[in-house]
Image: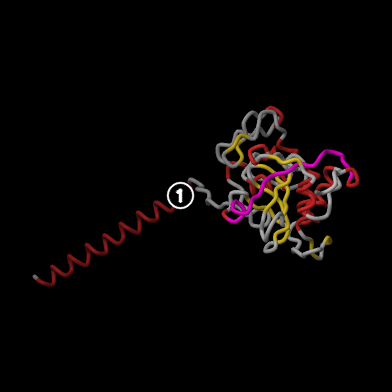
Amino acid sequence: MKSLFFVSVILSAVSGTTNIASAQTAVTLQRISNHTPFKITPQFIDGIELKRDVFATNKFTDNTIIKPAIGSVVSTTNPVVNKAKNFNGKNIGAGMIIEECTSLQFKYGQLMDIPVEEVSNMALYNLIENWWGTRYRYGGSTKRGIDCSAYVGELLRNVYNQHPPRTAHAIYAVSEKINRLDLQEGDLVFFNTRGGVSHIGMYLGNNYFTHSSTTSGVTISNLNDNYYSRKFIGGGRLIPGLKLEEYPAEE
């Protein structure tokens, strides 16, 4: 009798294992038949991730190919008529030609959490990209090292045809003072990092600014960061087209 009991238990265990294996195989085959995609967010430039919903079926001007997103509303036949493309949860805008967007626009749009079409001043962003990562060097003005005021001077001269004084303190002295809420792309932001006006950057939008940081070199930071919010003095705007010799004398 005991032998029959043990045989019965063994048969039940084998039967149960077989049923489990069959069920697992069925589930696996079902997943394969459904072609379930892997949910992988691709790495883009400098480790910045693009959200799945920004992918379009078009090829960008720099030949970067972006895969289509699930549920994408981007038209593959006539991108001109696209009405609402979503980039990082924000509306890209009606009538935008997605084929004209470059990887650089997506990189900085993602980096600053702004709609891609707001990255439109390509002269500015190309120059930022050109200097990106250059180390900080006090008194420097070359790719071997550049300080904050020299970097901002490069941006002002080459993008806005403005010729500021050399130091952050001198630039602040000849700038029209701007409230933080009124800052626009190309305006200047000033900080007290070691007494007085000692650091400068250029405002880009959405609280982000580019500058030459003593720790990271040429980079982009946020005014809301704890350090910069504490050190922020104010914003400024140079008079458009004014030459260096035409600025008012420092007091």
Looking at the image, residue 111 sits to the left or right of residue 10; the answer is right
Q: What percent of the width, then of the height, locates residue 171?
A: 79, 49
**Residue 231 falls within the magenta-colored stretch:** yes
**Amino acid type at mark 1:** Arg
Quarter of the image where one finds residue 56: top right
On screen, residue 131 versus residue 53, left or right, reads right
Question: Up-down: is 72 above or below 221?
Answer: above
Q: Position of residue 93 (x, y in %)?
A: 65, 31
Task: Identify whether 35 is placed above or below 136.
Answer: above
Above or below, 215 relative to 70: below
Residue range (magenta): 227-243
Report which residue position mark 1 lands on.
31
- Please state if 19 lies on the left or on the right of 125 as rendered: left
Q: Residue furthest left?
A: 1
Which residue is outermost to the bottom?
3
**Residue at the farthest front position:** 251
Name the residue located 64 percent from the left edge and 57 percent from the top edge: 47
Tell me if residue 73 can be seen: yes
Q: How is the image coloured?
A: secondary structure
Q: Position of residue 13 (x, y in %)?
A: 24, 64
Instruction: Tell me: 110 left or right of 186.
Output: left
Asked if residue 26 is among those painted magenta in the image, a careful observer would answer: no
Any part of residue 55 in sight: no
Residue 104 picture location, percent across and down: 73, 48
**In front: 61, or 212?**
212
Who's the residue at 35% across and 59% down the image? 21
> SS of the residue at dot 1?
helix
Circle 1 Cα neighbour tier, 10 Å, few/some/many (<14 / 14–19 / ≥20): few
Screen quadrant of the N terminus: bottom left
